[in-house]
Image (cartoon, helix red, strand yellow):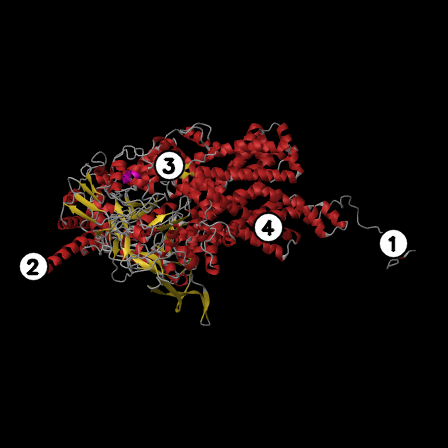
Amino acid sequence: MSDTTHNKDERPLEHYVSREPFDPYSVEKLTPEQERYYMASQWTMMWWKFRRHRIAVISGIILALMYFSAIISEVIAPYGLTARDTKHIYAPPQGIHMFHEGEFVGPFVYGYKTKLNLKTFKREYTANPRKVQPLRFFCSNEKNGTYEFWGLFESSFHLVCPAKRGTFFLFGTDRLGRDMFSRIVYGTRISLTVGLIGITVSFILGILIGGFAGYYGGWFDTLAQRLIEIIRSFPELPLWMALSAALPVTWSPVLIYFGITIILGLLDWTGLARAVRGKFLALREEDFATAAELMGAKPGRIIGRHLLPSFMSHLIASATLSIPSMILGETALSFLGLGLRPPITSWGVLLNEAQNINVVALYPWLMLPVAPVILIVLAFNFFGDGLRDAADPYK
Amino acid sequence: MKSGPLKTGLLTGALALLLAGITPAKAVDLVETPYFAKMIKKGKVPTVDKRVPAEPFIVKFEGDREIGKHGGSIRTLIGRAKDVRYLVVWGYARLMGYNADFTLEADILKSYTVEEGRKFTFVLRKGHKWSNGDAFTSEDFRYWWEDVANNRDLAPSGPPRIMLVDGKPPMVEIIDEVTVRYTWDAPNPFFLPRIAGASPLFLYRPSKYLKKFHGKYGNAEELAKMAKAEGQRNWASLHNRKDNLYKFDNPDQPTLQPWVNITRPPATRFTGRRNPFYHRIDAKGRQLPYIDKIVMNQSDGKLIPAKAGAGEVDLQARNLAFKDITFLKESEERSGYRTGLWRTAKGAHLALYPNLNVDDPEWRKLTRNAKFRQALSLSIDRTLINESLYFGLALEHNNTVLPQSSLFTDEYGRINTEYNIKKANRLLDELGLTKRDDDDLRLLPDGRPMNIIVETAGEDTEQTDVLELVHDGWAEVGIKLYTKPSQREVFRNRIFSGETLISIWFGFENGMPTADMSPAELAPTSQQSYQWPKWGQYYETNGQSGEAPDIPAAQELAKLNDAWLKATETGERAAIWHKMLRIHAKEMFTIGIVSGVLQPVVISHKLQNLPEEGVYNWDPGAMFGIYRPDTFWFKK
Amino acid sequence: MLTYTVHRVLIMIPTLLAISVLVFIIIQLPPGDYLSNLIEELKRQGETAALEKALFLRELYGLDRPMVEQYAAWVGIWPGNTGFDGLLQGNLGHSFEYDLPVSEIVGDRLLLSFIVSFATIVFTWVVSFPIGVYSATHQYSVGDYSVSFLGFLGLATPNFLLALVLLYFANVTFGTSIGGLMDPEYLEQGWSIAKFVSVLEHLWIPVLVIGTSGTAGMIRRLRANLLDELQKQYVVTGRAKGLHPFKVLIKYPLRMALNPFIADIGNLLPQVISGAAIVSVVLSLPTTGPMLISALQSQDLYLAGSFLMFLSMLTVIGMFLSDLALAVLDPRIRLGEGTSR
């Protein structure tokens, strides 16, 4: 015997026979977890895979919260959209404190001590430690008046209100004394929905054109490809600018808003169309598509019932990744003065008002709208990433 | 001879008088300008005694202003390349110009006389030369009048309108080398103010230079070749291209301004270099300007306050607004300048213009009613606007003349400007607008809610801000204000056609008039008056289009304006002015919001001879013109 | 290879043609045009001399002709008032606002536009390459996460806002003059060391601002592609056979990963150009961006149109070059399978 076969237990191998009844399918039997896995539907599997991507989940929650806040903006914002406090123009942000001189008071802010310095032409604000203004929650802000909630009913219910004769400017105020935090909250409505409408336009165009091109091929395909290439070769921003400059000035702000979203959508569908076309080209050769065709299904049915669902998830993922570029696009256009304009409030409009040296040097809190922009774009990106990973659960 | 000494004395005296008459007034010894030292050595530029006219303008300094030294460059910023014309505005070399008290005095001209307001005799300075050394004589005036203004090719529609009185051109006499006379049958009160304007009427051209490009004087073939080489169709368009005394974009064209533009466009940096043949000197014999160069850098308008604060300019006012004052003040120390706050001189910084010619019949009834306009004015909280946006430093006055003008009275300035909601409500009730809807908005007689859309040209957030503050006051009397930003062309066209109900714009162009300045702005004479565009158009087109004024007050204003044109005495003119101002005060055709807003002016610490507190206005004023930038100098 | 090139070139032509139609339509969309507005203005002011000139210009350039004729004249396939004189003949048109031929105005700015765009692309490559590689090879490490996060941040921030802040910061901290690509004194002077240094001092802001979002995208692509490659069989084999890990990385996977770099120029170029446009407005750079915006707003037909054409041509050519480079790099494309962007 050689050393290599020298075992620790020098027992001869035993012949092992199991006493259990014989089940020919035991090898193939699945554990409950495995069973769940194999029996799960496509969507369930996608959900599981998505869930593993932690950051995507968190992003999804953030997005949901922000869209929800767009619905209840009036409740979240302590001040109304047009509320003005001309005694507190260009007031810096008020920090929330919990302890006053060692004692616990609950969330409160220090009031302002204001002085108008006519030598430096500056409004000087200092926190006045004697003015303790506790915040109220689930309250109604009398100074603000009432608002109409989506035109349904009047209310003056707010999540947070300033103290009765105090102020609560979490992000400071602007040149007319308007609360920046409230304005940002209201801006959410416009900025977030621009992306949604634009993406719908883009979606429809992309699926229609890409779908027909991929499915029918031929001259339509070549035409569509050329069209896509042309639009892609165009430098985005100048095209946006040119189109925005073309919007008639006499249109109402709402119409301009829709015009902008449609413009953004019109220029974005190319990516989607390409993806759809590519997928269609591949999928229409698949067996299940041939089978359906042989069974007499009309092209519409084949596209709608068989081809589309198999990569809808991809589409959704791509679409999600396009929304941030639309939001940035609207921000950029409004920033240049070509998109939305006051009195509509969007983050882009707010940033436009912050684009001057006075703000950068003296009132930097007016640049805070950049924070939700970054947050939303990041959230959409991560969310889209997660969706894309999850979109093909069988990979 | 018995009266020997007496005769000698008389003779000497007579001789002395004679000599004094023909000896040039150059009682000062001229000092050479260091900047030209090298060029003089090379023979490119003659010495100062050959450059300054035989009878130069000798500047006298009073008060804080003092004699300065040669040297230095002023750096400034312009928002658009075509603003290089500001060298002509600031240079402010005019036949006669306004001084700091807004009185006219001869500048390029040695003297001028006016008879009966219709006969103008101008005397030039002997030995005055263009910036390239060509002689400046009455030939240059003749050239303009006969060969430019009345030349079919160069000016198909004839001489400029201002040269016509009752449609008739003047009789132009070239009396001698230095004397020119213009005679009309009736007074022409616009003549001198236009010549002294910021963008002036030029009665002369550099004839020697331009004759090269004129069909009458040049060789036809050569002209055609030159035209083609420059991409022009014919000699006329070539001549037009070369002849731009105001636009200042042809560095080859000679000028009389203190600084000559030596940069050929397109460029982002323009340099104005001193004019070697400038006609003004100081009492110590230094030829002006003191400053060698003005360097204009073009930059995006939004960045100019930042650059000014960073110390990149020596003198800047344009593109700076009151809202930048905090930042400018804060950067003073680190960038070495001071921020002057000069008064702007518009009748109002911002004013509302209810359109008396608006299409909508219901609204038209209201805008034509003085009580309605007064009610709107009484519901504006001017103090709030002043304190919020202007640190309380503006004047809460009507759109009328400013306190600095001799025509100002407290009544004109302040009538109906107080914030009085009760009175406003009462006036509106008296008009019969007593019905209100559920939101407490007043209703028009036909049931529509009183929603007023105020249109802006969309160029300035300041206007939208002010309107936001006005909105609250109007809400108190049951009127809802909507702001509609537009774009300048569209904005104007809508007003002209009667679609706009109320617009917001600047107030009267000249808020510091003297009785001898035209009151045309107060009468319906121009379509550009946004409160009565169609009446103005009627006047401008001599009744061809628009509508005739049909409110007695407006008709009265038109009559008074005509009377002013015929008046010959200052006293007469002042009385007419007061009558017109009183009508405006009572009727409140335009609703001024605030006036006298301060303009920040960044001035380098080293730059001298600027007033502590000046007036910043386009016409009259020429921005810095009336303070004579040619006398500014750098103290090390 | 040759057929591929010829094929691509042939496709470029109708693309450019179609773009020119699009551009023309867009410019004409807003009512009125510069000259009409100017004529109205001049009529009001009674400036007869300038008015004559404006009317003459309007006639010369056929602005009262039907749209189709104007378009054809602009492109140069139909004689205008001065014969065949359009884009195809090299005549970019006449700018009414500046009263100069477009080529004279654009010339200055082209060079600077190139410099900025080129510098940005170089910056993007130089920064994203090592970071992407590091990120892929040290997956899930702290470095990976932080770098990815920074990349995302760059992607999400509206860069133009950053521009103004950086401008102010550079001025206060380093004394750099605000805006522009160099200190104003050097504008007229010829090139010198001092001028070069001044340009560098100013250049980093627009490059940083424009480049950040492109960099982020590039890093992600590189990382994803490299990760894909690193899991492939041949890499495992190589490592198993004892190849030095560095060599394993360099020799094959990296070559594959270079694919998106080259392919992305096609994507990057339009992005850089349009990003550059908006940033140069904020920073007041003498490049094509600010001029384009003001031309669009004042409806200076030829200036805006020629600019847009120029930008699109840059993009089309850039994409063509990148396709070409990709074809050289990747034989699959050459042989007809098309790119997999």
Q: Amino acid at mark 2?
A: Lys
- Numbered tag placed on residue A13 in the rendering: 1
Q: Amino acid at mark 1?
A: Leu
Distance Cα–Cα, label 1 vs label 4 = 64 Å
Q: Nearer the viewer, mark 2 or mark 1?
A: 2
- Residue receiving disc 4: C126
Chain letter belonging to callout 1: A
Quarter holding the C terminus of chain A is top right
Prevailing secondary structure class for the magenta stretch in the rendered image: helix
In contact (CB < 8 Å): disc 2 and disc 1: no
Q: Nearer the viewer, mark 3 or mark 2?
A: 2
Chain letter belonging to callout 2: B
Find residue B218 and report its image quarter: top left
Q: Residues within 10 Å of mark 4 (few under 14, many from 20)?
A: few
In contact (CB < 8 Å): disc 1 and disc 4: no
- Residue receiving disc 2: B2
Chain letter belonging to callout 4: C
The percent coordinates of residue B210 (x first, y second) are: 32, 39
- The part of the chain drawn in magenta is C40-47
Distance Cα–Cα, label 2 vs label 1 = 171 Å
Distance Cα–Cα, label 2 vs label 4 = 109 Å
Q: Residues within 10 Å of mark 3 (few under 14, many from 20)?
A: some
Q: Is residue C186 left or right of residue B294?
A: right
Q: First in sequence, mark 4 or 3: give its number.
A: 3
The percent coordinates of residue A221 (x first, y second) are: 56, 31
- Residue receiving disc 3: C33
- In this picture, is A167 found above or below B576? below
Distance Cα–Cα, label 3 vs label 1 = 98 Å
Viewer-closest of C137 and B188: B188
Dot 4 and dot 3 within a common chain: yes
Determine the residue located farthest toward the front in the rendered image: B1
